[in-house]
């Protein structure tokens, strides 16, 4: 193989050369010229890169050597500073230990501190502080400024020293701290060391030693290091504490080169609070300052610039030609793709250009249209005079900025509407060479516009024909945006009626919105939705003498403003019918009570006969005894008291019956359930005793009040208990089964709290066909009944927002009674004075 290797090498070179020639010959002349121009440029760039790489490698080796020497010297200096700090720390700790062991009197503390300060120049002051932060003794060097002196008797309240004191007390060991650098002109900061004192195992204070960072740099740093480098002490925030750093030169200001020969290390045991930093002095010019490098670089750049200029000159013509071809093709494609027809005329009115859309609109080709003079083939014959006048205005420069509408004839004879926009045609030299016209087919927009107009007309006719008043006004303004015929007939063309209906209807006002509706109004104005919650109200307008049902809705007007639409319907006849129905219902209730009392007349007479008989007997007895003189004064008073009691009893019975049958307006107010049940039970017991029926009742304790008309609810209870007694009598139950039970207990319905009244009898119940029609008017199972009792009972309960139910009671398959029940809601809590609204108008019902 080694013998064949030299022979194989020329064969491989020949194959490579042959492939190169084939590739070169396969290129177009244009690409061959491009590669021929790029080859010298690539060679010069590679040469420049080689020179730059060589200079960079030499400079990198030099910087590495300088950095290594700097690192060794700085670490040596850091060890020297560290040993000096540890020696001072040991001496301060020895003083603290002697103070803790009471081997050193405080009187001798100043002497030893003074000896240390005079012997070691970096030590500036030594201070004794007790556990309460009181400064006991302090010894300082003469060089310490007055602002840094610590005076015996002062207290460490705040600042870096107080923070260091707390840290030393918590850790129980010596702690270093570097106070923050002050403003310009302030004394140099001092390095602080606090050593804790121990008094019988407890914290007894600290010994504070303060060092001058500048003296520490001067006396602790080796002289040979100070002579070779710019040495400084900096803190963790890179603030200079001692020494003078090098000023930034040109080398550091350049974006491509920074001062790299600098090294820093934290001084232990202080840590990051004290950092030793050294910067080497400049010893060489570097890469940027090397003249040979700049000479080679300038010559290479000049060569590259000449080659690039030649290459760009040869390509400029080709690029211009390619750009012209691309621009022409793009312009032609854009003109052919637009849907707007374009036509160019010269100053004499001859067509010089049409695009594809114009030809498609008219049906004639470009060859047929270009070169034509008026009248053009696409002009309808009936429009010659009009179109000729328009063309004259167009050529004279009197065209309308918004364009004008014309009629155009297609090649097949059909006519369509078009809008023309005319603008001057300016050439590259700024001279007008003709007029440019754009044509748009507006047949479909015209058709849609006509349909919209017809739709608007129909909509307006519908609104004008409504039997309701419709008005729209913006919020916060008295402008009337829309009003139909009935509104104008009632209120005219002003917003007075609209605002009056809004105000009386209790809906959100346009000018002064209520607080509880502010959130809804803000949501409407933010969301800008077409629909909004509506509000209904019934109001009375004296000036019209009409009752109106007002419905309000918020909407966004066509200009984006939030507006309020009010629809008012005349409901005067309906209100009159409702009032008449209410009066008829009231009369029916009164008649029902009279009928009930008529049916109970014999029982009432029997009930009144007892107290009247007792009164007669008491009076007869007293008369006979007075005549015989056999009665004492105390016996006479007792008899009179009994007589008065019986008279009061008879009067109460008559008063209850009179109040029950008295016709009165409904008076719904807070009523106690116990009182209503008691009144009803006393009246119903008379009828139940006549039928020999036992009545038991149970009322739950501490029932809340209900909002009701007491007389009407008593009427319901009496009717239900009387019907139960009659059902028992008709069933001919034995005496032990003749009972009616009344239970009143709290009960919730659909999550709402209320009170349930239950009347349960032991009769035969109700047949299924009777249950289906039980509450219908004029339906009765009694031969002499009117069929209004239960119907009125249910109407009374439902008018109190209650519900009434009935069901049979079973024992297996046998009906053993019937259960009537009705439910009334509890009274709502009264609103407070701060949140209650003003009383509504009595003529308004929501």
Image (cartoon, rainbow, N blue to C red):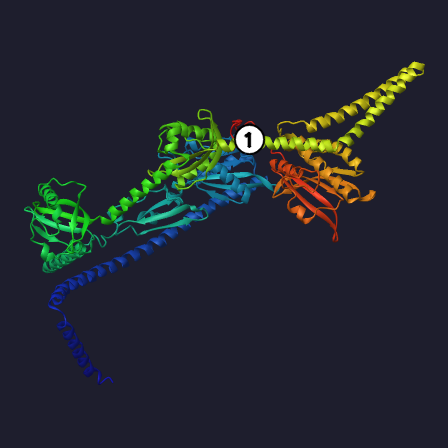
The residue nearer to you, when weighing 255 against 750, is 750
The residue nearer to you, when weighing 795 against 396, is 795
- Is the N terminus in the top left, top right, bottom left or bottom right quadrant? bottom left
**Residue 550 locus on image (x, y percent):** 46, 33
In the rendered picture of this protein, how many numbered marks are placed on residues?
Answer: 1
Element type where label 1 sits in the image: helix
Q: Residue furthest front?
A: 783
Query: Can residue 86 be seen at all in this image of the molecule?
Result: yes
**Residue 325 locus on image (x, y percent):** 13, 59
The residue nearer to you, when weighing 635 against 176, is 635
Query: Can residue 253 be seen at all in this image of the molecule?
Result: no
Q: Residue furthest left?
A: 348
Residue at 11% from the left image edge and 48% from the top image edge: 381
Q: Is residue 727 left or right of residue 749?
A: right
Residue at 57% from the left image edge and 33% from the top image edge: 581
Decide: few, some or many residues near mark 1? Use Cα within 10 Å; few <14, some 14-19, many ≥20: few
Q: Is residue 40 left or right of residue 653?
A: left
Q: Is residue 491 left or right of residue 807?
A: left
| Image: 574 above or below 614 | below
Residue at 31% from the left image edge and 47% from the top image edge: 227
**Residue 228 locus on image (x, y percent):** 31, 49
Residue at 77% from the left image edge and 36% from the top image edge: 688
Q: Determine which residue is flagged by label 1.
A: 579
**Residue 403 locus on image (x, y percent):** 17, 43
């Amino acid at each position: 193989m080694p013998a064949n290797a030299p022979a194989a090498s020329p064969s491989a070179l020949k194959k490579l050369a042959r492939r190169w020639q084939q590739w070169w010959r396969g290129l177009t002349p244009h690409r061959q010229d491009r590669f021929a121009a790029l080859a010298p440029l690539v060679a010069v760039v590679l040469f420049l890169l080689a020179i730059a790489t060589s200079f960079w490698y030499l400079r990198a080796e030099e910087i590495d050597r300088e950095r290594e020497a700097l690192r060794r010297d700085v670490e040596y200096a850091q060890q020297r500073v560290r040993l000096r700090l540890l020696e001072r720390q040991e001496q301060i700790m020895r003083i603290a230990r002697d103070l803790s062991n009471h081997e050193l009197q405080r009187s001798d503390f100043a002497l030893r501190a003074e000896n240390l300060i005079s012997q070691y120049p970096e030590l500036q002051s030594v201070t004794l502080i007790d556990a309460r932060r009181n400064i006991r003794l302090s010894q300082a060097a003469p060089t310490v400024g007055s602002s840094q002196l610590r005076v015996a008797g002062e207290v460490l309240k705040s600042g870096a020293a107080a923070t260091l004191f707390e840290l030393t007390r918590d850790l129980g060991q010596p702690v270093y701290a570097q106070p923050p650098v002050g403003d310009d002109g302030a004394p140099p900061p001092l390095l602080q060391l606090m050593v804790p004192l121990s008094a019988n195992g407890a914290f007894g204070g600290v010994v504070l030693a303060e060092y001058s960072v500048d003296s520490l740099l001067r006396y602790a740093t080796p002289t040979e290091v100070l002579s070779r480098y710019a040495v400084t002490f900096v803190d963790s925030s890179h603030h200079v504490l001692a020494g003078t750093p090098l000023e930034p030169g040109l080398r550091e200001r350049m974006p491509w080169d920074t001062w790299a020969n600098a090294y820093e290390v934290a001084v232990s045991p202080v840590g990051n609070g004290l950092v030793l930093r050294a910067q080497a002095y400049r010893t060489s010019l570097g890469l940027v300052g090397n003249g040979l490098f700049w000479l080679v670089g300038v010559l290479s750049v000049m060569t590259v610039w000449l080659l690039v200029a030649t290459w760009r000159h040869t390509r400029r013509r080709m690029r211009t030609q390619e750009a012209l071809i691309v621009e022409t093709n793009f312009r032609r494609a854009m003109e052919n793709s637009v849907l707007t027809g374009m036509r160019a005329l010269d100053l004499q009115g001859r067509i010089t250009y049409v695009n594809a859309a114009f030809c498609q609109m008219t049906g004639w080709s470009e060859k047929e249209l270009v070169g034509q003079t008026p009248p053009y083939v696409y002009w309808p014959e009936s429009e010659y005079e009009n179109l000729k006048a328009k063309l004259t205005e167009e050529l004279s420069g009197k065209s309308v900025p918004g364009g004008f509408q014309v009629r155009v004839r297609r090649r097949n004879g059909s006519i369509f509407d078009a809008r023309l926009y005319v603008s001057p045609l300016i050439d590259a030299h700024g001279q007008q060479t003709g007029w440019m016209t754009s044509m748009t087919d507006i047949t479909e927009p015209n058709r849609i516009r006509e349909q919209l107009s017809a739709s608007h007309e129909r909509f307006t006719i519908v609104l004008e024909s409504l039997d309701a008043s419709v008005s729209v006004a913006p919020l916060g303004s008295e402008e009337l945006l829309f009003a139909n015929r009935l509104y104008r007939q009632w209120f005219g063309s002003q917003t007075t009626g609209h605002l009056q209906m809004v105000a009386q209807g209790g809906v959100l006002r346009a000018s002064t919105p209520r607080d509880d509706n502010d959130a809804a109004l803000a949501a409407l104005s933010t969301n800008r939705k077409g629909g909004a919650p509506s509000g209904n109200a019934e109001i009375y307008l004296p000036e019209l003498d009409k009752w109106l049902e007002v419905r309000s809705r918020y909407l966004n007007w066509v200009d984006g403003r939030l507006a309020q639409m009010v629809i008012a319907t005349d409901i005067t006849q309906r209100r009159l019918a409702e009032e008449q129905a209410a009066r008829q219902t009231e009369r029916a209730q009164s008649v029902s009570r009279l009928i009930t009392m008529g049916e109970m007349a014999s029982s009432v007479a029997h009930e009144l006969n007892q107290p009247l008989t007792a009164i007669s007997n008491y009076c007869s007895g007293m008369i006979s005894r007075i005549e015989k003189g056999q009665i004492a004064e105390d016996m006479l008073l007792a008899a009179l008291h009994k007589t008065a009691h019986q008279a009061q009893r008879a009067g109460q019975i008559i008063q209850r019956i009179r109040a029950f049958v008295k016709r009165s307006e409904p008076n719904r107010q807070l009523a106690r359930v116990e009182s209503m049940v008691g009144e009803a039970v006393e009246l119903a017991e008379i009828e139940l005793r006549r039928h020999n029926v036992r009545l038991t009742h149970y009322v739950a304790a501490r029932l809340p009040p209900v909002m009701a008309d007491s007389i009407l609810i008593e009427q319901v209870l009496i009717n239900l208990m009387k019907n139960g007694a009659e059902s028992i009598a008709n069933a001919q139950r034995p005496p032990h089964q003749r009972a009616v039970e009344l239970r009143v207990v709290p009960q919730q319905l659909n999550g709402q709290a209320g009170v349930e009244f239950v009347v349960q009898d032991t009769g035969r119940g109700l047949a299924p066909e009777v249950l289906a029609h039980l509450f219908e008017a004029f339906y009765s199972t009694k031969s002499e009944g009117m069929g209004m009792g239960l119907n009125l009972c249910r109407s009374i309960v439902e008018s109190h927002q209650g519900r009434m139910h009935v069901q049979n009671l079973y024992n297996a398959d046998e009906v053993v009674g019937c259960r009537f029940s009705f439910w009334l809601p509890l009274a709502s809590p009264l609103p407070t004075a701060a949140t209650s609204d003003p009383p509504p108008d009595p003529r308004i019902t929501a």
